[in-house]
Structures are given as C-alpha cells and as structure tokens.
Image (tube, rainbow, N blue to C red):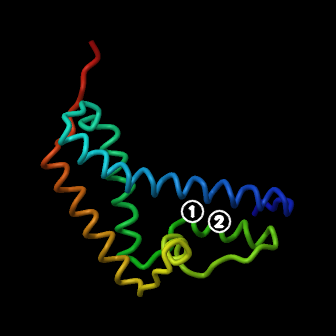
C-alpha cells in the first residue's frame, strides 16, 4: 500500500471529492440538459459517446446501491482523509453531502429507490431522445 504525507493525502482526498462532485454533476445536470436539448433540438444531445458514458456511470451507481456497496471514490476519499489525520464520514458520499447541503437524512433504501427511478428516467430519455452515431464529414 502506498502512503503519502499528511498534506499530500489531504490534497488527494480533495481531488477525489472534486472528481466525485464532477461525476454527480455530469449525471444529474447531463440528464437535465439531454431533456432540455431534446426539446430545443440540440444536435449534441444525440451523441452516442456522451449518452453511453452517462448511462454507464448511472448504471454503475444503481448496481452498487442494489448491492449495498459503497462507491470506490467514497472509499478512497475516506482512506485519504484518515491518512491526512482528518475525520472521515461513515455514510455514502451522496448521503453525507446531501445531509450537509439540505439536511436530508434517509435510510439507504430511499437512495436505492431514487437512483433506480432516476435510471428509469434516463432509459425513457434514451427512447424519447435516442442517441445516434454521427459520421465525420
């Protein structure tokens, strides 16, 4: 196992957190933009590679929630925070930050249900605004 200095561990934990927030933003805001873009006829919302990345990321989250597993990014961040001598939180990334942002605390099954319903919405969007392969001119 690689060990880092306290300051390096703290910086890496922050970088993992930023990446995690970026992924969550891509999944949530991406879905909103796909729907808005479908209504406004934006061509990029049909790009297969963007939509596939979105679907795979969300699929990974949903499968993890069904299995009761913790996200690897959460595990890495918590490990790095402990190495840095900082307090690591005990719940999942989403549970922790949602409770901090909006004081929302719920049992794990609520998040499983929310992720699953969001996944159903993403699949409906694939049907309503189907991705397409674009060929280079």
Residue sitting at the far bottom: 107
- Which is nearer the eye, 100 or 114? 100
User: Quick one: SS at disc 2?
Assistant: helix
Which residue occupies 53% across, 71% down?
A: 101
x, y percentage for residue 52?
31, 45
Query: Where is residue 66, by image quadrant?
Result: bottom left
x, y percentage for residue 109?
35, 84
**Numbered label attached to residue 73:** 1
Which residue occupies 54% across, 71% down?
A: 97
Which residue occupies 68% across, 76% down?
A: 88
Asked if residue 68 is positioned above or below residue 33 in the image, the reply reads below
* Disc 2 and disc 1 in contact, CB within 8 angstroms: yes
- Which is nearer the eye, 16 or 103? 103
Spatial distance from mark 2 to mark 1, Cα to Cα? 6 Å
Which quadrant would the N terminus be assigned to in this image?
Answer: bottom right
x, y percentage for residue 29?
38, 52
Asked if residue 16 is positioned above or below residue 86 in the image, the reply reads above
Which residue is denoted by mark 2 in the rendering? 77
Give the mark count. 2
Which residue occupies 16% across, 56% down?
A: 124
Crowdedness near tag 2: few (<14), some (14–19) or many (≥20) residues, C-alpha within 10 Å: many
x, y percentage for residue 127?
13, 49
- Which is nearer the eye, 21 or 134? 21
């Amino acid at each position: 196992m690689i060990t880092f200095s306290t300051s390096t561990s703290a910086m890496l934990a922050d970088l993992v957190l930023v990446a995690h927030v970026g992924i969550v933003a891509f999944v949530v805001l991406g879905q909103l933009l796909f729907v808005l873009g479908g209504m406004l006829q934006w061509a990029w919302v049909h790009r297969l590679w963007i939509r596939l990345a979105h679907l795979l990321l969300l699929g990974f989250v949903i499968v993890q929630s069904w299995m009761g597993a913790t996200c690897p990014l959460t595990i890495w961040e918590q490990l790095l925070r402990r190495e840095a001598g900082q307090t690591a939180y005990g719940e999942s990334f989403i549970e922790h930050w949602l409770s901090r942002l909006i004081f929302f605390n719920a049992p794990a099954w609520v998040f499983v249900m929310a992720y699953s319903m969001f996944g159903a919405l993403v699949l409906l969007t694939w049907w309503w605004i189907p991705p397409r392969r674009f060929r280079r001119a």
